[in-house]
Image (tube, coloured by chain):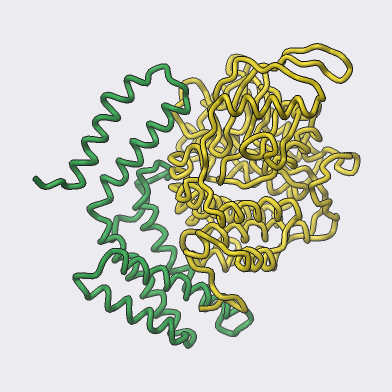
Chain colours: A green, B yellow
Amino acid sequence: MIRDFDAQLQVVLTALQDIVAPALSGADNHVIEQLMLSIATIGFVKARLPEARRFYRMDLRSWIDLSKDAAQIVSVPDDMAKAIAAGVGVLTDPEADSADIEAISRQLRDHVTALSAAAVGQPYQADLEAVILEKLGVLIAQNRQWTASFGFELQPENLPLAAW
Amino acid sequence: MTMGEYEIINEGQRQRPNDAIIAQIRDRYPTEPEIDRVLTTKMKRRQAGKCFEAATLNQLVEGTSNLISDRLGRPVKISNAKWLSGGASKIQMRFELDWTEPDGEERTDVLVLRMEPAASVTESSRTREFEVINAVNGIIPAPRAFWVDPDGSFLPYPAMVYAFASGSAKPSYDAGKVSGLGQNYGPKLRAQLAPQFVGLLAKLHTIDVACIDGMKHFDRPTVGSNQSIIRQVNSMRRIWEEDRIEEEPIMEIIYRWLIANAPPLDHVSIVHGDYRSGNFLFDEEQGKITAWLDWEGASLGDRHQDLTYAIMPSFAHLAEDEATLLGSGMMAENDLYAAYEKASGLTVDPVRIAYFNIYNRYLIAILTLAASARASRSRGTHQDVLVNYVVGLGYPALADLRDYYLGVVT
């Protein structure tokens, strides 16, 4: 029997929504609130789990693109150049783990920030900051789409379509 | 990999910081001594690998009883204790106390114990909260603060005891919402509450700070100086450094801007720091604000901080016309500023409004993407599921920060 994740999460959600929640009628508000938030959180996982690898790949692609744009403005340190190359390699490796993909994205986040800090007072500071602000605007919008089900978007219908 | 003169702190070091890491961060981002103490305590707790340990109601009753008995010098009787819901960051217990005032008056009071968990959305000082509530006593409706256990000597974590305040944080028809986030009070209640919302803010900001004896754990800012604001920005930057899950380069760009553009104070106000929907109680039938809560983020500083916080998009919703954004479910931004100027006699300065709009967006991005994410991941609170849920606000907040910043600097 295949214990697929979707079915496991589905049965938990059904139990919580159909059996546990009605039984808590009259319980303290914070108990009901925690149950409702648990249901919503599991719902998020259920919806996004099948897409997670695609999302992490898109995220890494975005950081590689930004890093390459930064390299057009300023000479990047060797370890950053190596991280860019490693990222390109991971994206072409069908056996790469999601954890590998995430780890390189994390490195590039740190490298870009360090590059920006080192740019203070340099003639290219404004250009570098502009490219960071522009490129990350697109990526942040994708992250908003990713987490929209949490219900904090004023107008979720205006978010860009998922690009992962 | 370095950032400036420092090695970049990695996730492992952030999860289990050693003394050198803690010292390095303190050195890089100097802030007020009491804020420094609170944040350092947080890091020391993390260093020791301490998760939140749930206390039973009986343990809290015993600890509270010992605290009050110690402060009064005589035994007291606590009864009818029960958990109190509300708020994302503190543990609360409601109870009744039979006791005798120092002047001999015998009383029975309904009180609230407010205690920190091991980690929090907002790490804060119970001592400062205690002091500011006493400072506004009789001016702003806030529950009377009775006793404080600043270091957790009697209770599992630092805590304070204050009077129970009646009222609701949410309208009865919308009780399921996470408190304060996009709260819609509806047209009738809004019309009743909005003038009080602005009027009380004006009262708070016009309290003569020089005449307050208490507030010993607050730095006293100087008119004409921007040092107090820089210290506040540093405290936020420090939380970002200590708590973030991953780096966001935009945050560094905006930190630099906030430091370079910090405006000098033109008037010293008591700043609530979390002045928004969800942080006051009201009587729904009478349409009256009964108490302002959550004073833990209070500071002495610039009124524009509260003004802009109240209208943050995170706490706003669209009015019935589907076009007007109502800050804290109360008023459109310009209406709020106009009403505030009239009520306070203080000016609303567009330059400072722009600055604190960025500051507050920076703060919200940090409290969601860093503090909340770290607290829930480290099993630091009594309601990790709620604190984790609030992280969902992080990317809308970061987008809002970026967009607003670009609107100001370009």
**Number of numbered discs present?**
0
Residue drawn at (34%, 55%) of the image: A160
Q: Is residue A89 left or right of residue B137?
A: left
Residue B252 visible in rendering: yes
State the residue in front, B103 or B204: B103
Q: Quadrant of the image for the C terminus of chain B?
A: bottom right
Q: Is residue B36 left or right of residue B102?
A: left
State the residue in front, B236 or B190: B236
Residue B141 visible in rendering: no
Instruction: State whether residue A115 is above or below residue B263.
Output: below
Res B163 → quadrant: top right
Instruction: State whether residue B407 is above or below residue B310.
Output: below
Percent across and percent down for residue B311 are 60, 43
Percent across and percent down for residue B328 are 57, 37
Residue drawn at (46%, 85%) of the image: A76
Residue drawn at (77%, 57%) of the image: B228
Residue drawn at (32%, 79%) of the image: A86
Instruction: State whether residue B181 is above or below residue B7.
Output: above
Percent across and percent down for residue A49 are 26, 51
Instruction: State whether residue B260 is above or below residue B137.
Output: below
